[in-house]
Image (cartoon, rainbow, N blue to C red):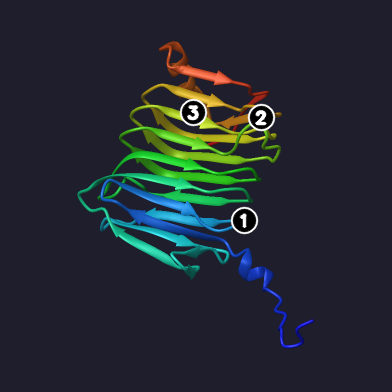
C-alpha cells in the first residue's frame, strides 16, 4: 500500500452547486443547465432601456459566478429566448420580456423531472410560447403561472405526470392553444376573463385542452 497517497473528500456542496450558462448567438439567447441536475433558481427580466438580465438566485451560478448575472442588450432587437433546465426543483421567474424596448419572438422554457415553478409576468411574445415541465414519468407537482401574458402565435404548455397547477391571469392568446396536464390530478385556476379567453379560443377551434381534472375560478 502506498502510504504517500493522500485521500481527499470532495465538497458535496461544490459538486452539486446549481449552475447555468448563457449563450447569445445573435438570434437566440439560450440558458442551459450545466453539471449535475439540481435546484436552479433564475430571474430573467428586461428593463426599460432594453437590457435583458439573467440572474441566479439561491446560490445558482450564472456563467461561473454564484448569484451572478449576465446582461444582454436587446434594444431594438428581435430575439428568441430558450431556457433548458434538467432534473431538480427549479424556480424560474420571467418578467417584462418583450414589453419594454426589446421584441421577444419565441419563448421556450423546459424543466426536467422535479417540483418546478415557472412564472411569467408581463410578457409579450410575437411568436410562440412553449412551457414543458416534464414528461409522464415526472410524478412531482409543478406550478405554472401566466400573469399578464400575450402571445401572437401558438401557446403550448405540458405539465408532466404529477398533480400540477396552471394559473391564468390576464391572458391574450391569439393563436392555437394547447394545454396538456398529462398524467396526474391537474387543475387550472383562472380569472373570469382568462376563462373567457379560453372559451373564445375553443369557439374558434384553436383550443386543445387535455387531461385536466378541475377548473377553478379565482379573483383578479
Q: Position of residue 213 (x, y in %)?
A: 68, 23
Q: Is residue 61 above or below residue 106?
A: below
Q: Position of residue 164 (x, y in %)?
A: 65, 35
Q: Callout 2 environment at 10 Å: few (<14), some (14 to 19), or many (20+)? A: many
Identity of the residue drawn at 52% across and 27% down: 192
- For this view, does 187 lie left or right of residue 101? right
Q: Callout 1 environment at 10 Å: few (<14), some (14 to 19), or many (20+)? A: many
Work out how far the residue at label 2 is from the one at label 1, CA to CA, in angstroms: 24 Å
Identity of the residue drawn at 38% across and 34% down: 150
Q: Is residue 54 above or below residue 213?
A: below
Indicate which disc residue 38 carries.
Answer: 1
Identity of the residue drawn at 59% across and 51% down: 90
Q: Secondary structure at mark 2?
A: loop
Residue 121 position by quadrant:
top left
For marks 3 and 1 on the same chain, the one whose residue lies earlier in the sequence: 1
Work out how far the residue at label 3 is from the one at label 1, CA to CA, in angstroms: 33 Å
In the orientation shown, which residue stands out farthest toward the right? 1
Q: Nearer the viewer, mark 3 or mark 1?
A: 1
Which quarter of the rendering shows the N terminus?
A: bottom right
Q: Position of residue 129 (x, y in %)?
A: 41, 34
Q: Nearer the viewer, mark 2 or mark 1?
A: 1
Indicate which disc residue 186 carries.
Answer: 2
- For this view, does 174 lie left or right of residue 189? left
Q: Do the CB atoms of the residues marked 2 and 1 lie less than 8 Å apart?
A: no
For marks 2 and 1 on the same chain, the one whose residue lies earlier in the sequence: 1
Q: Secondary structure at mark 3?
A: helix
- For this view, does 5 lie left or right of residue 155? right
For marks 2 and 3 on the same chain, the one whose residue lies earlier in the sequence: 2
Q: Which residue is mark 3?
A: 194
Amino acid at each position: 500500500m502506498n502510504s504517500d497517497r493522500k485521500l481527499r473528500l470532495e465538497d458535496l456542496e461544490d459538486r452539486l452547486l446549481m449552475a447555468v450558462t448563457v449563450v447569445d448567438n445573435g438570434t437566440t439567447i439560450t440558458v442551459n443547465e450545466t453539471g449535475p441536475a439540481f435546484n436552479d433558481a433564475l430571474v430573467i427580466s428586461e428593463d426599460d432601456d432594453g437590457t435583458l438580465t439573467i440572474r441566479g438566485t439561491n446560490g445558482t451560478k450564472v456563467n461561473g459566478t454564484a448569484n451572478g448575472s449576465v446582461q444582454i442588450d436587446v434594444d431594438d432587437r428581435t430575439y428568441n429566448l430558450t431556457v433548458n433546465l434538467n432534473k431538480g426543483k427549479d424556480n424560474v421567474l420571467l418578467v417584462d420580456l418583450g414589453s419594454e424596448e426589446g421584441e421577444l419572438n419565441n419563448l421556450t422554457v423546459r424543466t426536467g423531472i422535479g417540483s418546478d415553478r415557472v412564472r411569467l409576468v408581463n410578457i409579450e411574445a410575437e411568436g410562440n410560447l412553449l412551457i414543458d415541465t416534464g414528461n409522464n414519468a415526472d410524478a412531482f407537482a409543478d406550478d405554472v403561472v401566466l400573469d399578464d401574458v400575450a402571445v401572437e402565435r401558438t401557446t403550448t404548455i405540458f405539465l408532466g405526470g404529477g398533480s400540477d397547477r396552471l394559473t391564468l391571469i390576464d391572458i391574450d392568446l391569439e393563436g392555437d392553444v394547447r394545454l396538456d396536464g398529462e398524467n396526474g390530478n391537474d387543475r387550472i385556476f383562472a380569472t373570469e376573463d382568462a376563462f373567457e379567453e379560453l372559451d373564445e379560443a375553443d369557439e374558434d377551434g384553436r383550443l386543445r385542452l387535455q387531461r385536466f381534472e378541475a377548473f377553478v375560478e379565482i379573483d383578479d
